[in-house]
Image: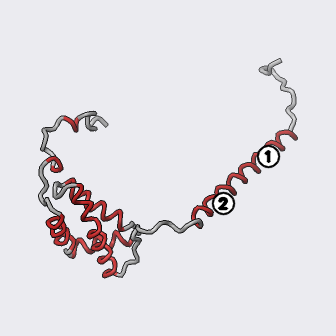
Amino acid sequence: MFDAPIPGMSLTHELGARPWQSPPQYATVDEAIEYYLERMSTDEFMDQMADVLEMNIPVTTLANTVQLAGVMDGKHTVDVGMLVMPLLMEMIMLIGDNAGVNYDSGLTDAPDNTTKDTLIEAVRKEMQEKIDDAKEVSEETEEVKEEPKSGLMARR
């Protein structure tokens, strides 16, 4: 419980002590692409990515996670990471296609009105049931009349 960081502790490190505060290892988009192509072409990475794609996690989320990890490790800057995103997505989709995984690209919106209408209808039914239950309870309480309390501790 007491092992948590002290508020403001992250501001006490020397400038440049963190990987993202120093110059990137790969300064250009081409260098970053070569880095990712080399890293993503390993059998271990492909197997892990296919497993993650089977969990139906969108490709856009995976690509963003990979490039953000590169920024945090000091491999490249944020702007280079954003420019590399389309390549990362294509590579991840290629891995999914080769593995025969039916993946979610994350590029399309959810089906139009079907999801919203279904959700609204479910909420409407639930609220109507609660209203009906409340009416039944109020009708039952009207029918039951309280008898005057008697006894040693009853109020007068």
Residue located 64% across and 55% down the image: 123
Quadrant including the N terminus: top left
Q: Is residue 129 above or below residue 32?
A: above
In-front residue for pair 142/145: 142
Q: Is residue 55 above or below residue 97?
A: above
In-front residue for pair 119/138: 119
Where residue 41 sits: x, y (%)? 20, 75
User: What is the number of callouts on the image?
Assistant: 2
Quadrant including the C terminus: top right
- The answer to which image quadrant residue 39 occupies is bottom left
Where residue 99 sits: x, y (%)? 32, 80
In-front residue for pair 94/122: 94
Circle 1 crowding by C-alpha within 10 Å: few under 14, some 14–19, many from 20: few
In-front residue for pair 98/137: 98
Where residue 34 sits: x, y (%)? 15, 70
Q: Amino acid at mark 1?
A: Lys
Circle 2 crowding by C-alpha within 10 Å: few under 14, some 14–19, many from 20: few
- Which is closer to the viewer, label 1 or label 2? 2
Residue located 80% across and 19% down the image: 155
Where residue 21 sits: x, y (%)? 16, 47
Tell me the residue that label 2 is attached to: 121
Residue located 40% across and 77% down the image: 102
Secondary structure of the residue carrying tag 1 is helix
